[in-house]
Image (cartoon, rainbow, N blue to C red):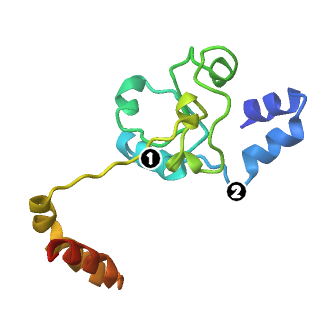
Amino acid sequence: DAEVEALAASTGHAARVGQALTGPQSAILVVDDLATAARYSDAYGPEHLSVQTADPDALLAHLQSAGAIFLGPHSPVSLGDYLAGSNHVLPTGGQARFGSGLGAYTFLRPQQVVRYDADALREAEPMIVALSRAEDLPAHGDAVTARLTR
């Protein structure tokens, strides 16, 4: 604690660092194993995740939700922000649970194309009708049935 407090006080943004360390988004968790650590991290969805373990790759295999992950003692966050190319525009506020950092793919707009033939639609009909009824959207199921009875 004393070392962290001394480092925070020595920055040009001591108040901001203090708020970051004591705010509702901050915690120190002690867990029994790396799998549990990965589950907590994924639930939180950190913008930056620094992994400082004896075998960071072992933990990496279990991590799914972080904006950028920094492995080992020679991979500080500032390396990713300024030089390594990971990105500096990352999801904040836990949004890494469902989003990722800015990249070329951010500007792509993939389209989903669906093409079934009559036999495939006939096979899918009972499932679609059942789901549409369960969602109280019966016209969706009716649209399938209508196509097959023409």
Q: Nearer the viewer, mark 1 or mark 2?
A: 2
x, y percent for residue 82: 70, 18
Left or right relative to 17: residue 30: left
Tell me the amino acid under the disc marked 1: Val
Which residue sits at x=11%, y=67%?
122
Q: How many marks?
A: 2
Image-quadrant location for residue 137: bottom left
Q: Secondary structure at mark 1?
A: loop
Tell me the element at label 2.
Answer: loop
Numbered label attached to residue 24 = 2
Q: Residues within 10 Å of mark 2 (few under 14, many from 20)?
A: few
Which residue shows up at 68% across the image and 21% down it? 78
Q: CA distance from mark 1 to mark 2?
A: 19 Å
Residue shown at the point (87%, 27%) measured from the top left: 10
Of residues 46 and 130, the one nearer the viewer is 130
Residue denoted by label 1: 31
**Contact flag, marks 1 and 2 (Cβ < 8 Å):** no
> Residue extending furthest front?
150
| Upstream in sequence: badge 1 or badge 2 | 2
Q: Which mark is residue 78?
A: none
Callout 1 crowding tier (Cα within 10 Å): few <14, some 14–19, many ≥20:
few
Q: Position of residue 110 (x, y in %)?
A: 45, 41
* Amino acid type for the residue under numbered disc 2: Pro
What x and y, as percent, mark residue 24? Answer: 70, 56
